[in-house]
Amino acid sequence: MPLRAEGPAAAVAAHPETVGDKASRLRNKATLTAHDHQERLEELAGVRQAFQRITEGAADAIARAFHDAKQRKRCGDDRPLQAITQECVGRLRGGESLQVVDAGIAGGVKVADPSTGAFFKIAEDTVGIYRGSSVMADKAAKHELAMLTHLHDADAARLLTVPLASCVDVTVRDAAGRPERVYRVQGFSRHAVGGRTLRVGSGDGGVTAHVCAELDGVAEELAAGLHLAPSLKTPSSGLFTRHEYRRRQDSCGCVILILAGAASGGAAGGRLG
């Protein structure tokens, strides 16, 4: 019987359908005939092409702004690189709706476009994770895209909401037209997920962990489908958050999981996937 979860984490503000929203809707759309199935695949292909165009449209402004920001940083601007990049991107054509965001330290500078629901990042080592090697940062970007491609095609994909992804290499040139640097810009469709939506696993590098007995079966099936081994490591802080749901059946026969509460503590049973 199908499951559906309800609760504070599932509530999101109404917003216009983005390209990522449309892709998720089409991937989950039921089809009854071969014609319907083929039509759905063609619509999905069109959505992916549209997202590629979105990435291409933003990549040039992002790469040039980041390049200019690094040059200004080298010339003595002591502001954070993200702040300089935001100032630079706002001056470029195509950068009016782009916002530099603070979202972790790996993956370089991150930029969001609320108007399209897209999220971008430059494969550049800005904090020394790869000892300043742009080559290694590019390799990490390639692995990330390969992983998303696999997840789109995996048998367990029905349990996942996988973002659209694309990659554009941008050559930044000087005033004379000579190439100065090539930047790899990755684009992803954004999803309404965050710290408050996490139910199983850790969102802070293993400091704390979340467990939910109702989702153990889903997590185990997903891990088996993706050939992932369970993690037996306890969080370094010893703190768990346990999420509990109660079941209710709606008029269509679907079993709805309603969030009953979340409790934090220093002990919890079960495994983390």
Image (cartoon, rainbow, N blue to C red):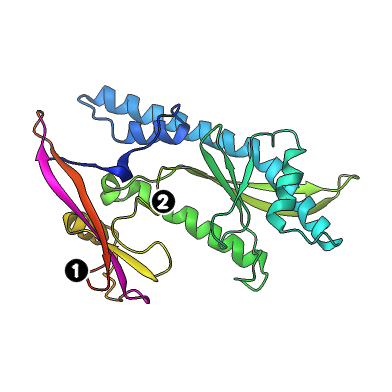
The span picked out in magenta is: 235-250
Residue 194 disc label = 2
Residue in view at x 47 percent, y 35 percent: 48
Instruction: List x then y, in percent, for residue 104.
Output: 54, 59
Assign a secondary structure to mark 2. Answer: loop
Instruction: List x then y, in percent, for residue 114.
Output: 55, 36
Identified by mark 1, the residue type is Gly
For the stretch drawn in magenta, the main secondary structure is: strand
From the viewer's perspective, is residue 48 above or below residue 229?
A: above
From the viewer's perspective, is residue 143 above or below residue 25?
A: below
Residue 167: in magenta span: no
Identified by mark 2, the residue type is Gly
Instruction: List x then y, in percent, for residue 162.
Output: 38, 46
- Side (left or right) of 132 relative to 214: right
Q: Quadrant of residue 89?
A: top right
Residue 238: in magenta span: yes
Q: Quadrant of residue 10?
A: top left
Q: Quadrant of the N terminus?
A: top left
Residue 165 disc label = none
Q: Residues within 10 Å of mark 1 (few under 14, many from 20)?
A: few
Decide if residue 98 is in sight here.
Answer: yes
- Side (left or right) of 125 relative to 181: left
Q: Quadrant of the C terminus?
A: bottom left
User: Foreground: 247 or 45?
Assistant: 247
Residue for badge 1: 270
